[in-house]
Amino acid sequence: MPELPDLVHVEAVLSREACGLPIADVRVGDPVVLRLMLPDLFPAVLKDKRIVEVKRCGQFLRFDLDGGLCLVVNAMLSGRYSLAETGARAGRDVILALVFSGGTELRYADETRMGKIYVARADQLDQIPGFATLGVDLLSNDFTLPHMRRLVANRRDQVRQFLLDKTALASIGNAYADEILFAARLHPKTFCHKLQPDEVDRLFAAIRETLNAAIREIQARNQPIEVKVRDFLKVRGRAGEPCPVCATTIRRVRVGRDDACFCPICQPTERKLFVDFRKVPGTAKKKPMG
Ligand SMILES: [Zn+2]
């Protein structure tokens, strides 16, 4: 649920407000979300440690603690972070609360329990599913147009599924996949190998511009980290509403396992997707197989 622009904000707030404070106490909720990769007693191993650094890695948030200890969180669909005053009422979906000496606590809650918290040593991070295989960080200097062209050249899937592939691009979720495709004026079901060179260029620019604009917006709002700021999105969650560009009704369509929101006028289906067999030599006379 927290996507890259949300995590940039969470990373900044927690770097400022949670780093360097000794962990005086730890509360643990439903253990189904926890993955302990250490032989040490948990949560005792966290006591008196400090968070040294908070770092966003794709869809993960990595907390480096004293002594080479790491917490790596994959929030999946419903995980969320919050900072609260110690003793403030907490919901039953809190999975882990780090209580700092000084009166605040960092909570991670997960209503659907689909996320994971890995407790590991820094040299074990490669064993975390999906962590070592993360694709290019979309905010890094490694994400360039030539890199994007190389990625697209090897794909046979639909462009929206490509955007969601964390081993290629780190990381885009459902909301920003829709926003990026709208900005690039591409139908979500367009196949990657049908993209024209100028469309790949447009997609690359749309990824950067959409994510950077969202980061600026979320940082400007400066809401508490548990608040999901999404009201500025143009098509995501707006099926049935008018397109902000052309006023056509925004539609919802199934792409793979997910629903996509798109404008059928601004993001037209590529007619080239359908082969006109009357124009393909030799196919007209063939009998259908099977
Ligand atoms: Zn439109």
Image (spheres, rainbow, N blue to C red):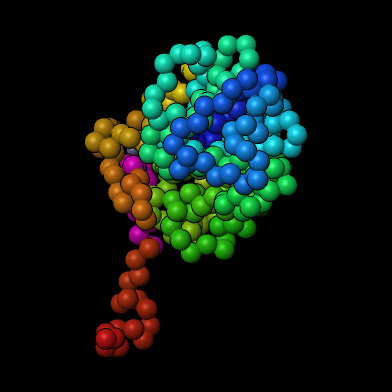
Q: Decide if residue 77 is on the left or right side of residue 165.
A: left
**Most frequent secondary structure within the magenta stretch:** loop
Residue at 55% of width from left, 31% of height from top? Answer: 7
Residue at 27% of width from left, 86% of height from top? Answer: 290
Q: Position of residue 75 (x, y in %)?
A: 49, 38
For the question of whether residue 175 can be seen, the reply is no
Q: Decide if residue 112 is on the left or right side of residue 194.
A: left
| Quadrant of picture, ligand 1 | top left
Q: Is residue 225 above or below residue 55?
A: above
Location of residue 12 (image quadrant): top right
For the question of whether residue 47 can be seen, the reply is yes
Residue at 65% of width from left, 45% of height from top? Answer: 39
Q: Is residue 153 above or below residue 54?
A: below
Magenta region, residue range: 261-272
Q: Is residue 55 above or below residue 273?
A: above
Q: Position of residue 85 (x, y in %)?
A: 51, 12
- Whether residue 135 appears in magenta in the rendering, the answer is no
The quadrant of the picture occupied by the N terminus is: top left
